[in-house]
Amino acid sequence: MIDIEKMTKLYPMGDTVVRALDGVDLHIDKGEFVSLTGASGSGKSTMMHLIGCLDRPTEGLYKLDDQRVDQMNDRRLARIRNRYIGFVFQTFNLINRTSALDNVGLPLVYAHQRVTRKKAMQALERVGLAGRAHHRPSELSGGERQRVAIARALVNNPPLLLADEPTGNLDTHTGEQIMALFHDLHAAGVTIVLVTHEMAIAAQAQRVVRMRDGKVIEDRQVDQIFREELLAGRMKAAGKSAEARTA
Ligand code: ADP
Ligand code: MG
């Protein structure tokens, strides 16, 4: 589904250039569930922007579902996004002055109000929130807001779901509920790429891709051994930050 070769993204910054992506190769098959991890500034969000066709690479090749998207103009990229990709963000990005139902219907371009409402309602049902359709985001809990955002991402039935730290603003228990929803969507055939720096979240994917300084430094299937390593690494990292705090 995703074929990326030697992809580079440079951001000019005054006299210098930030090498946000530095020659990345990445292939993701239809139906995979992949975690993208790495320290802050390692290039995860840039990678998601490019995978999500929100931006074009400076250099390199990107094929999405066998279509070259790296050179497409904005209008064609928008069409690809609409057809293929759902986005979920850490901060939900919902519109506060309107209902959950209207938020979910936003990506739909139907002229028929009735069709829009029906599809939006179906997407809310898919995330278990049909009962909250007429609430505004401010009347919902964090976990419910994220589920509305996931319903909005799903409303066009995209085959690819991209989530950038979707549990980052949620407590552990609510984060687990969101992960359970991702597991359901994955089981239903959706390809998922999820950015997280939490190893307990990353370890739930089938495969973990780790970035550093704009490069992929590790790309590994999650088996029992690797899962335990990831969870142990999380403990170590937690211990380290505790040390740093007391130092
Ligand atoms: P991550 O999501 O892993 O924290 P990012 O992809 O956001 O990393 O950033 C990678 C690098 O690119 C960082 O050094 C960041 O400062 C830089 N960067 C990201 N977006 C921009 C931008 N729009 N303009 C300039 N530099 C950017
Ligand atoms: Mg980021």
Image (spheres, rainbow, N blue to C red):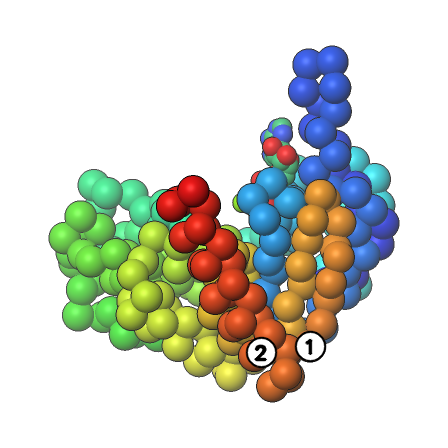
Is residue 58 left or right of 174 when viewed as pictured?
Answer: right
Q: Name the residue under label 2.
A: 227
Q: Does the residue labelled 1 lie within 8 Å of ligand 1?
A: no
- Please identify the quarter of the rendering in which residue 129 is found: bottom left
* Residue shown at 79% from the left, 43% from the top: 22
SS for dot 2: helix
**Quarter the N terminus occupies:** bottom right
Q: Position of residue 203 (x, y in %)?
A: 54, 73
| Residue 221: numbered disc | 1
Q: How far apart are marks 2 and 1 (CA)?
A: 9 Å
Is residue 11 left or right of 235 when viewed as pictured?
Answer: right
Is residue 11 left or right of 202 when viewed as pictured?
Answer: right
Name the kind of residue labelled 1 in the image: Gln
SS for dot 1: strand
**Crowd tier of the residue under label 1, counting other residues whose Cα lies within 10 Å: few below 14, some 14–19, many 20 or above:** some
Residue 235 vs residue 6, the one in the foreground: 235
Name the kind of residue labelled 2 in the image: Arg
**Quarter the C terminus occupies:** top left
Q: Confirm or deny contact between disc 2 and disc 1 (CB under 8 A).
A: no
Q: Can residue 111 be seen in this view?
A: no
* Residue shown at 67% from the left, 63% from the top: 209
Q: Which of marks 2 and 1 is nearer the N terminus?
A: 1
- Looking at the picture, does residue 143 appear above or below residue 14? below
Q: In which quarter of the image is ligand 1?
A: top right
Q: Can residue 214 be seen in this view?
A: yes
- Looking at the picture, does residue 77 appear above or below residue 177? above
Q: Position of residue 2 (x, y in %)?
A: 73, 63
| Residue 2: numbered disc | none
The residue lying furthest to the top in this view is 15
* Residue shown at 77% from the left, 65% from the top: 27
Residue 238 vs residue 48, the one in the foreground: 238
